[in-house]
Image (spheres, rainbow, N blue to C red):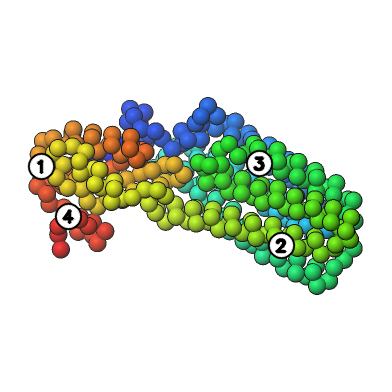
Amino acid sequence: MSIAQDHSHDHAHDASSGHAHHDQGIDDIGDPGSRRRGKLLFAFALTTVMMIAEVFGGIWSGSLALLADAGHMMVDSLALLLAFVGAWMATKPADARRSYGYGRMEVLIGFVNALSQFVLVGWIIYEAVTRLMHPGEILSGVMFVVAILGLFVNMVVLRMLHGHAHDDVNLAGASLHVLGDLLGSVAAVLAALAIRWMGWLWADPVLSLLVSLLILNSAWRLLRLSAHILLEGVPDGMDCAEVEKSLRSAHPSIRNIHHLHVWQLASGSRMATLHAELHEPAASASALLAINQLLLERFNIQHVTVQIDPDGECFDQTPGCVGHGHP
């Protein structure tokens, strides 16, 4: 007896499947993908111009806070450019070699962005300690003006990206960079005021250290999220035991569910594979429909592959296939 399989969402993105596609997430909530990419490109240009201004301002004024912020902006520019490339790549259709398309590109870019932040933080800490040991003259007036401009630019860019960063690892990575940059600009403004009115030269490296710690915390969260998706971990907030229990009661003909795997191709793109044993093999069509509807409506799993085990016998004897009663 052959093994019947159901692919509720084929890799060619068949419109008749009735399921949401991942690339649709780029165009959701009335925001076309081209508009989002346009925002990223504009943010890249704006950040690059400000980065150049901070480099000259930092060298001119002798401020580590400005140079650190300029270094962060340089990484920001690359992050925004990569985010643009990632958003564009995610729209490319599946092909013969990449049957799922390029949706995971956004996760790879988010992972790289998080790692780059660790490198940046290391450089800031090294420079800050050096400045604390050997303080130098700082032109607080120049530092203040450039820091205010940087703060304004970062607020504009973050405003552009913030609305979509909650559901997109790619944009979350870019937003993380910009948020860290905004904090760097705030630190530079405060340091400039402290140096000008209090004569506290140590304020420049100390506030740079504080910002680096804030960046480090956010970078760690993004690194964990993107690595979890790349390792095909269960989506946050989802309990596979609960999913399996729900599936067993999805249809009267279902006798058992096992070999359940749930993961994400990219942010918000949930997928699942499972084996189903039926009391009545003739009811497989209605059972498959019930399984797909439950997973979509209750757990937001859009892409489901179901294998029907004939006569309750599972032919998959791999260690990962558990729960079917075989040794």
Q: Which residue is mark 4?
A: 324
> Which quarter of the rendering shows the N terminus?
top left
> Which quarter of the rendering shows the C terminus?
bottom left
Looking at the picture, how far across and down is residue 113, in whole percent?
59, 53
Residue extending furthest bottom? 133
Identify residue type, mark 2: Leu
Q: On the rendered structure, is 227 left or right of 64? A: left
Residue at point 40%, 48% (across, down): 237
Marks 4 and 2: in contact by CB < 8 Å? no
Q: On the rendered structure, is 214 left or right of 264? A: right
Q: How far apart, in angstroms, are the residues tagged by discs 4 and 3? A: 50 Å
How many numbered dots are placed on residues in this image? 4
Q: On the rendered structure, is 148 left or right of 27? A: right
Residue 85 visible in the displayed image: no
Whichever of labels 3 and 2 marks the residue nearer the N terminus, that label is: 3
Q: Nearer the viewer, residue 248 or 15?
A: 248
Q: Secondary structure at mark 4?
A: loop
- Quadrant of residue 84 in the image? top right
Q: How far apart, in angstroms, are the residues tagged by discs 3 and 2? A: 22 Å
Looking at the picture, how far across and down is residue 280, in whole percent?
9, 39
Whichever of labels 2 and 4 marks the residue nearer the N terminus, that label is: 2
Residue at point 24%, 43% (across, down): 247
Q: Which residue is mark 3?
A: 158
Whichever of labels 3 and 1 marks the residue nearer the N terminus, that label is: 3
Looking at the picture, how far across and down is residue 198, in whole percent?
88, 59
Q: Which residue is mark 1?
A: 279
Q: Which residue is mark 2?
A: 209
Residue at point 42%, 42% (across, down): 269
